[in-house]
Image (cartoon, rainbow, N blue to C red):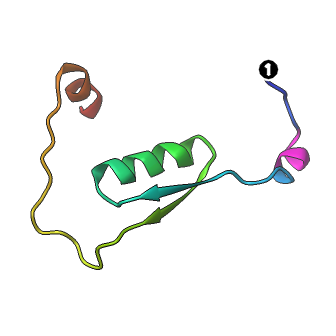
Amino acid sequence: MTKTVSYSEFSQLPQRRALVVGMGVTGLATAGRLAAAGWEPVLIERSADRRRGGYFICLFEAGRYAAE
C-alpha cells in the first residue's frame, strides 16, 4: 500500500539508515543504490589504506549490458 505525503509530512519522517560494510566495488554500488532509494548509507571499512591488489570483475551478458 502506497501513501502520498506532503513535503512537510515527508520531512518529519524518520530517516532510514543502512550500515554498509566494506568500501569495495560491491559496498560502493550498494551505498549508491540505497542513497538513490532514499536511504542514508553509512559506510565502514577496516583497511586504513587503499588495497593495491585490485579487483576481479567478471560480467556476463546482462551485467556487461548494464555497465555500458
Q: Amino acid at mark 1?
A: Met
The residue lying at 46 percent from left, 48 percent from top is 32
Closer to the camera, 59 or 44? 44
- Asked whether, in this view, residue 45 is left or right of residue 54, the answer is right
- Queried whether the magenta region covers residue 43, the answer comes back as no
Residue 65 image offset from top left, x and y in percent: 24, 24
- The span shown in magenta is 6-10
Residue 52 image offset from top left, x and y in percent: 11, 69
Closer to the camera, 36 or 28? 28
Label 1 neighbour load within 10 Å: few <14, some 14-19, many 20+: few
Element class at badge 1 = loop
Residue 28 versus residue 66 in the image, above or below: below
Residue 26 image offset from top left, x and y in percent: 33, 47
The residue lying at 15 percent from left, 42 percent from top is 57
- Asked whether, in this view, residue 3 is left or right of residue 68, the answer is right
Q: Which residue is mark 1?
A: 1
Specify the farthest residue to the left.
53
The residue lying at 36 percent from left, 60 percent from top is 22
